[in-house]
Image (cartoon, rainbow, N blue to C red):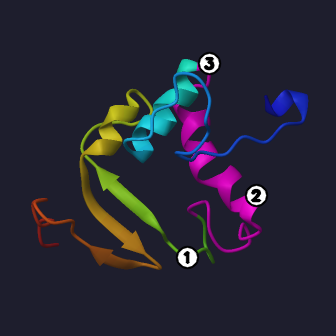
Amino acid sequence: MAGQGVRLIAGTDAGVAHAVFDGFVSSLEFFRHIGFSPAEAIDAATVEAALALGIASDTGRLAPGYRADLIAVTGDPLADLAALRDVRLTMSAGRPHVPAGAPAPAPR
């Protein structure tokens, strides 16, 4: 769609056939259903969403000078978006948070 000049961003309220509303990862899997690669689906949730919201100057990507918002998961979401369901660590503005029930990261 980007080649058509249309920006799509990830969300759970699309209101279109086959879209599900039971979780954010499911909304990314919908992008796979309509032909996006896993990387393009992740970009819709990060880079493209930050651009659409007008906050791309400090978030939406991992780069020097950006907020360092990220998640660590088990598995490779570029191979299978379902890996995003197993979040082990969340970082917001560079501050770590371990989700309830996730094993604590190993000490460095």
Of mark 1 and mark 3, the one earlier in the sequence is: 3
- Tell me how far mark 2 sits from mark 1, CA to CA: 17 Å
Above-or-below relation of 45 to 21: below
- Residue 61 location in percent, x, y? 60, 60
Residue 13 placement: quadrant: top right
Left/right placement of residue 106 relative to residue 73 reads left
Left/right placement of residue 47 relative to residue 27 reads right
Of mark 3 and mark 2, the one earlier in the sequence is: 3
**Is the residue under label 3 in contact with that under label 1 (CB below 8 Å)?**
no
Q: Residues within 10 Å of mark 2 (few under 14, many from 20)?
A: few
The residue positioned 42% from the left and 36% from the top of the image is 26
**Is the residue under label 1 in contact with that under label 2 (CB below 8 Å)?**
no
Q: Which residue is mark 2?
A: 52
Which amino acid type corresponds to the residue marked 2 in the rendered image?
A: Ala
Q: Is residue 27 magenta?
A: no
Above-or-below relation of 24 to 72: above
Magenta stretch bounds: 34-62
The residue positioned 54% from the left and 19% from the top of the image is 33
Q: Which residue is mark 3?
A: 35
Left/right placement of residue 57 relative to residue 76 reads right
Q: Which residue is mark 1?
A: 67
